[in-house]
Image: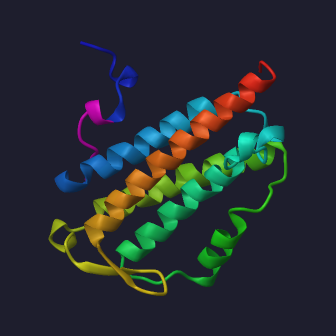
Amino acid sequence: MSNPALLEVWLRGPISGVPALLQPVAHALLQAREELAAALADFRAARLNERPAGVASVGFHLQHLAGVLDRTFTYARGEALNPAQLAALAEESQPLALDEETLAQLQQRFAQQVDRALAQLRGTDSAVLTERRGVGRAQVPSTVIGLLVHAAEHTTRHLGQLLVTAQWLKSMNNE
């Protein structure tokens, strides 16, 4: 048998306590956390704000990854965003301090947000998955499962963009 640690998260089996219908969400978030840590292990913080060819920076994606999980899981609980969440959203596109501490804090913030998301998934009753939830001030209609699946999909999309941008930046100076 293969070493389980070398398998993608979804092939390692169910995540304890997460309802069966939400396993793909949990798997995607855990996979994203692992891939992010591996990709940024040798990334230089001095490059956080760089936007080669105008693409979004690694710093933006790092902030957005944690922020979008926080916001979509808030909506899935049927809650509105609070002032701190709105302020964090506004800050996502702002340049970051270019030091290793900032890079480490952003990675830790995402890892912690994944932990909070997993805790919420574990506490989500499958019976509420089709309940209506409003998104944003306009209360655009969605459902609990729609928001949770979107959180996973959005996370993987931005992780992919971050991975490509980070690799591009590393290759620019043969890092």
Residue 124 in picture, x, y percent from top left: 27, 67
- 83 lies above or below 93: below
**As drawn, which residue projects farthest toward the left?**
127
Q: Quadrant of the N terminus?
A: top left
Magenta segment boundaries in residue numbering = 10-17
Residue 164 in picture, x, y percent from top left: 59, 34
- 57 lies above or below 31: below
Residue 47 falls in which quadrant of the image? top right
Relative to residue 74, is residue 12 drawn left or right? left
Would residue 123 be seen by someone viewing this image from the given angle?
yes
User: Which residue shows up at 26% across the image and 65% down it?
Assistant: 145
Relative to residue 91, is residue 164 drawn left or right? left
Residue 135 in picture, x, y percent from top left: 41, 78
Prevalent SS, magenta region: loop
Residue 84 falls in which quadrant of the image? bottom right
Residue closest to the eye, 168 or 10: 168
User: Which residue shows up at 39% across the image and 24% down it?
Assistant: 5
Label total for image: 0
Residue 2 in picture, x, y percent from top left: 29, 14
Would residue 41 be seen by someone viewing this image from the given angle?
no
- 77 lies above or below 9: below
User: Which residue shows up at 41% across the image and 76% down it?
Assistant: 75
Residue 139 falls in which quadrant of the image? bottom left
Q: Quadrant of the C terminus?
A: top right
User: Which residue shows up at 65% across the image and 37% down it?
Assistant: 165
